[in-house]
Amino acid sequence: MRDILSLSDPQDGEPRDPMVSAQANMRAALPKRFYTTVETGERDGLHHVLLDGRAVKTPGKAPLALASADAAALIAAEFERQVDVIDPSTMPCYRLANTAVDGVATDMQAVLEDVLRYCGTDLLFYRADSPQALADRQREIWDPVVDWAEGLSGSRFHLAEGVIHVAQPRETIAALGVHLKTVTDPLELAAIHSMTTLTGSALLALAVWKGEIGAAEAWTAAHVDEDWNIAQWGEDAEARARRDKRWAEMDAADRLIKSL
């Protein structure tokens, strides 16, 4: 399958990922908190975050216009929590919304296809052959999601033991694509994509999006192997901190989907 997130960069001619491109614009020195009040407001049916009455814009200078008051409220709360400086690393909803406007909205089809690409190599398809307790745990947690996705697509997935690639039926992937194409809001698609990359599983992301499972349940499913190793060998503090940070992004994506 072609690299479905290849976009032409007019400056250097290299392929560019719209998600990464939007996020790169946010890597800058932290500005001081310059505002006193944080509010939300509606204009032309869209919702905005207002700092001292001025609407927030994205790093790409586009209006940060949101489809729902609840989504705007989530981002407003993140701005309110800032103290001396504005630190985007502590504002996962804001960062995801920026990505949606500056990146995803420019090529929703490319992002949709990237989610489908994960379907072809989904975490849930690759099972341990040993130890037996781990294999049993994977079946317990993963099989219900795979069964649900098969019902959604109307066809079967191919499972494998180990890491040897197993091709999935094109018609199965295409059937899941039909559901994804119903997404019209770039923020909703950005949230689905974020959950997919965070878990390594499009099936888990789709199950959360459709309300089949909760975000915390999907997060547990995505870390079955890691949690098994932690139970055997203990947990590294730095790895725990990285996982907690990624969970904050997962939780933000889930909350934004529910807000739309």
Image (spheres, helix red, strand yellow):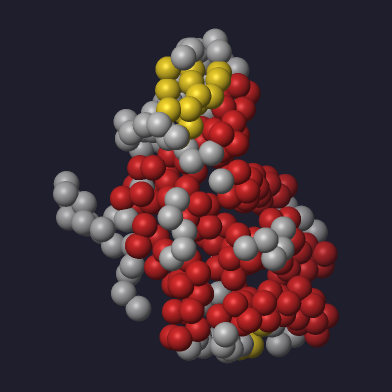
Q: Residue at x 76, y 73 (%)?
A: 141
Q: Nearer the viewer, residue 259 or 23?
A: 259
Check the image and report above or below for 140 versus 3: below
Asked which quadrant contains residue 113, the reply is bottom left
Q: The N terminus lies in which quarter of the figure?
A: bottom left
Q: Position of residue 184 (x, y in %)?
A: 43, 55
Q: Position of residue 80 (x, y in %)?
A: 60, 21
Q: How many marks?
A: 0
Q: Is residue 115 visible?
A: no
Check the image and report above or below for 198 versus 91: below
Q: Position of residue 258 (x, y in %)?
A: 63, 48
Q: Nearer the viewer, residue 79 or 235?
A: 79
Residue found at the very far top of the displayed protein:
36
Q: Position of residue 253 (x, y in %)?
A: 58, 49
Q: Residue at x 67, y 61 (%)?
A: 211
Check the image and report above or below for 153 versus 195: below
Asked whether, in this view, residue 76 is left or right of residue 1, the answer is right
Asked whether, in this view, residue 245 is left or right of residue 4, the answer is right
Q: Is residue 150 visible?
A: yes
Asked whether, in this view, residue 220 is left or right of residue 74, the answer is right
Q: Residue at x 72, y 58 (%)?
A: 214
Asked which quadrant contains residue 170, the reply is bottom left
Q: Nearer the viewer, residue 246 or 106?
A: 106
Q: Residue at x 77, y 68 (%)?
A: 228
Check the image and report above or below for 71 versus 214: above
